[in-house]
């Protein structure tokens, strides 16, 4: 574990652009901007295709399940790989797999027979491949970030990384919605511009791989031990004992799992708000608008006090805004509610990411990041399945409203179960380790 002087060095604040002084950080963030833009555009096309084929909320939810299941089985091994092998090479291999999967989606959308008669299993099969690539690349990418910037600029790098993610997350769905409405000669009429969307995503993936390949930072291998269940499970053991970390990621898990409405946006855009593909793109972009505003604000004015309490309040706001979205019949009110959803969730992202990196020793970052990615996958992709399933049972509106109420209840429960989270003050390594008293007095994790 890092000693006190190293943790203090991590927490030193520079100017608000300090992370961008690193060439490798600039390359990596440019690559992320491209690949997330493409992935979000692709998600719009996939969701619209599946719903057009099946008109089923449950089948729409299966898209999230297909992305989540590979991570459930391989994520812990992926974390061990991220601590043992060159993280850059892992990332390049995984995104190469995703590029191949996107090429298959492009072929499916151009074929007149591949998806006929409501056949959606080929799409699910491709999504499993994409999910496998994400499962292995996620921990490696998260653990690679400290290698790209000086230690004193790390918190600034985390905040800028979240900001760039939101810029792409905001723009990608809008781009996907616009491209999807473009006609393409010779394509199946139902799919309109779906091949254009997949072609765009494929170009973004190739651009990502080219930029990451130019990164020169040395990827230090921190885990020397051979593969074993003990080393693989060390990340889970660490998170379980680090109650501050456990509280922050479990709060995010259950709040987003219950309150996430993203998977049901095609239903709201089509059947409730009657907004079409462009309306879907608009709705998908709105959470990122709110998140972007908050993340830019936090770059200039970072959270300095009461970080844990602020996170709890914002997750409660997230649940309340989800309820408003579920009850809305106006696309503008719905868009406004989604802006608040994204803004409040962004605070949770920054707090959780800072806790994850600053309170974790370097030799454990890959495996702890794998646990975090498993939680994120459960809240996002598996949350899409949960949303589809509950919408199938109760209807889309009731599913979203009940989920929002559940998020608020989870927030109240977490405040009681994790006093370390409630007491967390400044987002610095020393302050976070002090709040995490139970881990501080524990024996080191092997």
Image: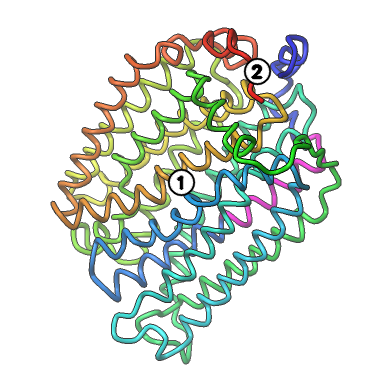
In the image, 202 versus 433, the foreground residue is: 433
Observer-side mark, 2 or 1, equals: 2
Q: Position of residue 444 (x, y in %)?
A: 65, 18
Q: Earlier in the sequence, mark 2 or mark 1?
A: 1
Q: Characterize the magenta stretch by its predominant secondary structure.
A: helix
Q: Which residue is mark 2?
A: 444
Q: Residue 183's x, y, as percent?
A: 44, 82
Please name whichever residue, 315 or 431, is drawn nearer the observer in this view of the structure: 431
Could you tell me if the residues under marks 2 and 1 are in contact, i.e. CB atoms within 8 Å? no
Residue 178, picture quadrant = bottom left
Residue drawn 46% across the image and 44% down it? 288
**Of 206 and 292, the residue lying toward us:** 206
**For residue 293, side relative to residue 191 (left or right):** right
Residue in the image at 53% along x and 37% along y: 371
- Magenta span covers which residues? 20-36
Quadrant in the rendering for residue 148: top right
Task: Look at mark 1 in the image and give the residue it sits on.
Answer: 377
The disc at residue 85 is none
Residue 245 location in percent, x, y? 51, 23
């Amino acid at each position: 574990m890092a000693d006190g002087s190293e943790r203090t060095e991590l927490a030193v604040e520079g100017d608000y652009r300090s992370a961008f002084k690193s060439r490798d950080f600039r390359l990596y963030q440019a690559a992320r901007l491209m690949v997330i833009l493409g992935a979000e555009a692709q998600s719009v096309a996939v969701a619209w295709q599946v719903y057009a084929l099946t008109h089923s909320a449950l089948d729409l939810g299966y898209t999230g399940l297909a992305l989540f299941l590979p991570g459930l089985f391989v994520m812990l091994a992926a974390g061990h790989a991220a601590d043992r092998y060159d993280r850059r090479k892992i990332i390049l291999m995984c995104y190469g797999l995703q590029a191949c999967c996107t090429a298959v989606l492009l072929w499916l959308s151009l074929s007149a027979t591949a998806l006929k008669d409501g056949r959606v299993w080929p799409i699910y099969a491709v999504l499993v491949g994409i999910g496998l690539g994400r499962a292995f690349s996620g921990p490696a990418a998260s653990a690679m970030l400290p290698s790209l910037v000086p230690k004193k600029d790390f918190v600034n790098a985390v905040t800028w990384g979240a900001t760039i993610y939101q810029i792409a997350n905001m723009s990608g769905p809008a781009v996907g919605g616009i491209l999807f409405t473009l006609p393409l000669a010779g394509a199946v009429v139902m799919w309109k511009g779906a091949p254009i969307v997949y072609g765009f995503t494929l170009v973004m993936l190739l651009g990502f791989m080219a930029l990451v390949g130019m990164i020169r930072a040395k990827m230090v291998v921190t885990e020397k031990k051979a593969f074993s269940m003990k080393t693989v499970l060390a990340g889970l053991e660490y998170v379980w004992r680090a109650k501050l970390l456990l509280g922050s990621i479990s709060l995010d898990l259950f709040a987003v799992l219950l309150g996430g409405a993203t998977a049901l946006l095609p239903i709201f855009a089509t059947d409730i708000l009657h907004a079409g593909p462009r309306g879907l793109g608009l709705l998908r972009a709105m959470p990122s608008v709110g998140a972007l505003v908050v993340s830019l604000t936090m770059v200039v004015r970072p959270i300095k006090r009461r970080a844990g309490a602020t996170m709890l309040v914002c997750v409660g706001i997230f649940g309340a805004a989800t309820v408003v979205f579920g009850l809305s019949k106006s696309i503008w009110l719905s868009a406004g509610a989604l802006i608040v959803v994204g803004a409040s969730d962004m605070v949770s992202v920054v707090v959780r990411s800072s806790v994850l990196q600053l309170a974790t020793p370097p030799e454990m970052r890959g495996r702890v990041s794998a646990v975090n990615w498993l939680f994120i996958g459960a809240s996002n992709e598996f949350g899409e399945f949960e949303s589809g399933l509950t919408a199938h049972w109760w209807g889309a509106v009731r599913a979203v409203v009940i989920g929002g109420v559940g998020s608020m209840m989870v927030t109240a429960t977490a405040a009681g179960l994790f006093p370390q989270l409630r007491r967390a003050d400044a987002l610095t390594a020393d302050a976070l380790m002090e709040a995490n008293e139970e881990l501080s007095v524990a024996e080191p994790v092997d």
